[in-house]
Image: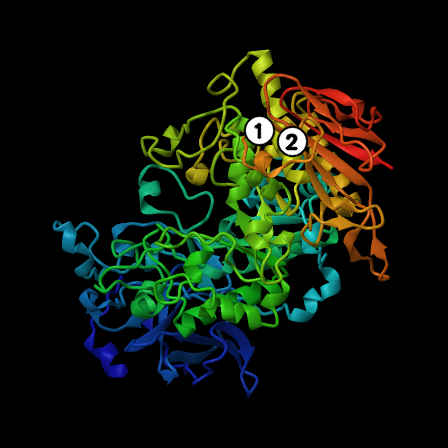
Amino acid sequence: MSSALEQEALPDDGRARTAPDTVTVRPGSPQPLGARFRSGPDGVAGTNFALWAAGAEAVEVCLFDDAGAETRYALTELTHEIWHGFVPGVRPGTRYGYRVHGRWDPWTGARWNPAKLLLDPYARAVDGDFRLPPEVYGHVRDWPEQHIADTVRDDRDSAPHVPKGVVVHDDASGDEWEDDRRPKTPWADSVIYELHVRGFTKLHPDIPEHLRGTYAGLAHPAAIGHLTRLGVTAVELLPVHQFAHEDHLLRRGLRNYWGYNSIGYFAPHAAYAASGTRGQQVGEFRRMVRALHDAGIEVILDVVYNHTAEANEMGPMLSLRGIDNRGYYRLQQDPRRYADYTGCGNTLHVVQPHVLRLITDSLRYWVTEMGVDGFRFDLAAALARSMHDVDMLSPFLAVIAQDPVLRRVKLIAEPWDVGMGGYQVGAFPPLWTEWNDRYRDAVRDFWRGAYPDVRDLGYRLSGSSDLYAWGGRRPQASVNFITAHDGFTLRDLVSYEHKHNEANGEANRDGTDDNRSWNCGAEGETDDPDIKALRRRQLRNLLTTLLLSTGVPMLVAGDELGRTQHGNNNGYCQDNELGWLDWSLADDPEWRPLTELVARLITLRRAHPVLRRRAFFSGRPQGPDGLRDLAWFTPAGTEMTDADWYAHAAGLSMFLSGTDIPQRDERGLPVTDDSFLVVLHAGEAPGRFTLPDAPWARTYELLVDTAREDQEAAPGTAYAAGAEVEMPGRAVWLLRAGR
């Protein structure tokens, strides 16, 4: 291997130097991968470096002092395609990267270029930010003939322009995260709250300014207090793996805000750390998780293992591309090009054993050493592809299913990708839950007046048994949501019919056009009091529907406050007030009742097991009274017929029987509950509804009426069974049935 180093003239900016004679690199160990500080057999402290780089001809680990001077050490030991060595004296806080030598032959997929400093895929902390000048590209980015630019090697040194990995002391172990520290909320009892670490805390007035936008800010009592007042059981954090900003955004003066552009699967994103970036971010993240656990809140990470920030063949060389391009990425039949099932330029080659190991090692690390409770997998269908097609027996899903750590945590699939056959809603195996976009579409359509088949709406409200009642799956397989980070906020959903993404600098071409929204009579903000009141009512309708539906509800941070992005439905690059949560809304009398309604509904959901069933409804007579556990009624108070199910209706009622719930408590006793009637009326005008008569109930008590701004005025109103009532237009009623 030394001959390869001697034969290749390496770029030298005057700061690089070879290893000093006083330091002898020891063989070290190929396990574990990454940089691990430890003591050798003779008690000498140092760091073991191990990198999988199949096909490489030589590997150097490059250490950087505080002034940026680089010292290179050749890793001469090679065990099962892993290059490794122990460097004495290298302590935690040391910054490092790799240079990997090999052939430059893009026509065969070989893209080794030792002029480029590469981030360790197993780096546990990263110091510095990604900039993308021409030196960061493995090829000559500005080559005159752009159609072959990616084949022309760029020999300029990238080290001054890229962040470095940081050696981190392994001061945490699995014992630190015993199960009794974790809330371990059952799926059926979960209420998920999707938030952005930076955006949730950046403008919070009660969080100290130096902590805003950070992990420590999310751990602050002011942030956690809002979550506990709402009653949510888990936060789902938008990506916190180290990520990079895309070149096209940097050129427009923007940045990647959401973070779906990962480059370091073990490192907490350094920009979200208040305590420092030389390893301190690891401890800060752990303390955040512990604070949330102490409040009874689980931590779920949104993870992006389907692609990396290196994009397609015209993208930068930051890590995997320069380590082993053909090993880490799926290539097309023309190996110069990348298979792209993600719409982001590349797709990780998950069927490759070491790539699969990278992902599962990362997942286990975040569970055992960082304390997280689960994961939401971005474009999970891309991970489930074997060679080309999505395969529910794929290596990735098989490994997860048998892993003793990962099979115990919450696993959420975004069950699609952008490739052929990528839409897989309802197809993931029983261990998984899924984002249910069919729920989103049906509920949006109903409340905007584009009524779906009642049959489709009924399935969505009752747990989507048509999608998930197979293979032992249960209603919690459906993560019900109406909004997510991607798309309109809930307030914008009732305020805009068209996207307004001009601030993104893409001529409003980005973002979906399929919003299924209704602006209630005016596009955007308005001073019309009637339109504003209608919009607030629609928000109450949407949130009430979500929190009374069977399945796992997911809220988006700020929707309970009336947050707006002014019609931008693709705020991925808006790291500013447009993307951050406006906490002044929390004290606004116009929006405070909405927050109170959400908290009230979550409290009701937590108190009543019939609203969070662990098994699907059977629709068959149950118990001594012979009542079905789920029954549907027309506005006339009659049970729905087959013809009714295929109609398009603006109103229907759903009766949830609590007399014979198919579950038992911790003592093994049957669980019983109150019974409820949920009445939904999406029509504009008031409607006449007949409440189901005996034997379903004798009386009904109104608990929630979304026609009211203040829910405190609603409880206590009583109706006799069989009574005809006038239901306000565009409203939801929740009534408790009296026997």
Residue 136 appears in the rendering:
yes
| Crowd around label 2: few <14 · some 14–19 · many ≥20 (10 Å) | many
Say which of 302 and 200 sits in front. 302
Amino acid carrying mark 1 in the image: Ala
Vertical comparison of 295 with 369: above or below: above
Mark 2 lies on residue: 652
The location of residue 253, given as percent across then percent down, is 36, 37
Residue 292 appears in the rendering:
no
- Mark 2–mark 1 contact, CB under 8 Å? yes
How far separated are the C-alphas under marks 2 and 1? 7 Å
State left or right for residue 83 relative to residue 564: left
Question: Toward which corner of the image does residue 669 lie, by quadrant?
Answer: bottom right
The location of residue 81, given as percent across then percent down, is 37, 80
Name the residue: 67% across, 52% down.
Answer: 616
State left or right for residue 249 relative to residue 369: left
Say which of 612 and 169 sits in front. 612
The location of residue 383, given as percent across then percent down, is 44, 61
Secondary structure type for disc 1: loop
- The mark total stands at 2
Amino acid carrying mark 2 in the image: Leu
Mark 1 lies on residue: 649
Vertical comparison of 706 with 215: above or below: above
State left or right for residue 228 relative to residue 388: right
Q: Residue furthest bottom?
A: 42
Vertical comparison of 623 with 372: above or below: above
| Crowd around label 1: few <14 · some 14–19 · many ≥20 (10 Å) | many
Which numbered dot is residue 407? none
Q: Residue furthest left?
A: 145
